[in-house]
Image (cartoon, rainbow, N blue to C red):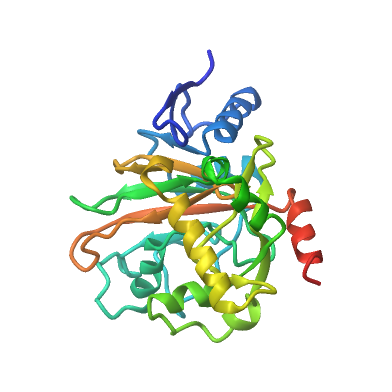
Amino acid sequence: MGIRVKPLHPHIGAEIGGVDLRQPVPPETFAEIEAALNQHAMLVFPAQLLIDEQQVAFSRLFGPLETSPDFAGSKKTRIRHREVEDISNLDSDGRVMSADDSRLLFNRGNQLWHTDSSFKHVPARCSLLSAHEIPPTGGETEFADLRAAYDALSEATKRKIDGLVAEHSILHSRTKIGFREFNKEIQSALPPVPQIIVRTHPGSGRKSLYLASHASHIIGWPVEEGRKLIEELIAFATEPRFVYQHRWRVGDLVIWDNRCTMHRGCAYDDTKYRRDMHRTTVSDEINSVERERGRESVA
């Protein structure tokens, strides 16, 4: 018996049933999951409260996993698995962080529309986020389908942006929210990288925008003119018709394809309510053709 796929939105998102991710996933079942992800770009697996080792094992089926650098300069973490990132407002002792905690301030940047790891030389293929605790209100996550957004662009705009390359930087996106307390090694470890704006999504063969709050400017354009275009494209791509908002339940595991989506976390009272989320991120090492084409065009 195959998995059950229930679409959640005309463009993006489906709920998946008929599989227990706490157990090893057979190849034929994984093939169905991967096909559903290629079609819907974001999948919700309800009632799958995984321990970190189970999440890592499932995530590795999609490819090699990233390990996250210490962006905020914090010395301690609650999570011991190096391939699991702590997307929470909890300190190393499991208490709600103080308002001036650097990691809390850094993580508020996730409320900007973004694509995970677009600021890396090898960006992300997909991300998996597991809900362990959720606040009583707020803290939803919104997802935008950048393939549907590209399809809806005017032909004139498609011609205008074809071949354009943007420079992406984690420093740029966090500067937008006033965060400047980067670990000193970050600037040298993660210099700005070029990313082509229009690419073909490998899993579906559809053209997609590739945008993020990490995108600073258009290479070869006046900076302000390029930033204006990026902002206009992000505003268009995140119109309600392209967006699904996920209201979390404890035990939800959500996976999204970073190559054809953007997402953002919604605000909540992060100095009062607990929100404990564990994320694994799959590197896109095996799909580098268009990424390298983008780099070669600005070399």
Q: Quadrant of residue 99?
A: bottom left
Residue 221 at what x, y percent from top left? 65, 74
Judge whether 81 appears above or below 201 on screen: below
Residue 75 appears in the picture as rendered: no
Q: Quadrant of residue 15?
A: top left
Residue 88 at what x, y percent from top left? 35, 61
**Quadrant of image for the C terminus:** bottom right
Judge whether 297 appears above or below 31 on screen: below
In this rendering, would 280 be left or right of 298? Answer: left
Decide which of 69, 169 is in the foreground and name it: 169
How many dots with numbers?
Answer: 0
Q: Residue furthest front?
A: 156
Identified at 51% across, 47% down, the residue is 53
Residue 110 at what x, y percent from top left? 41, 63
Residue 141 at what x, y percent from top left? 36, 50
Q: Residue furthest top?
A: 1
In this rendering, would 37 be left or right of 87? Answer: right
In this rendering, would 202 be left or right of 266? Answer: right
Identified at 40% across, 60% down, the residue is 87
Decide which of 106, 177 is in the foreground and name it: 177
Identified at 28% across, 50% down, the residue is 133
Judge whether 200 appears above or below 17 on screen: below
Identified at 53% across, 46% down, the residue is 146
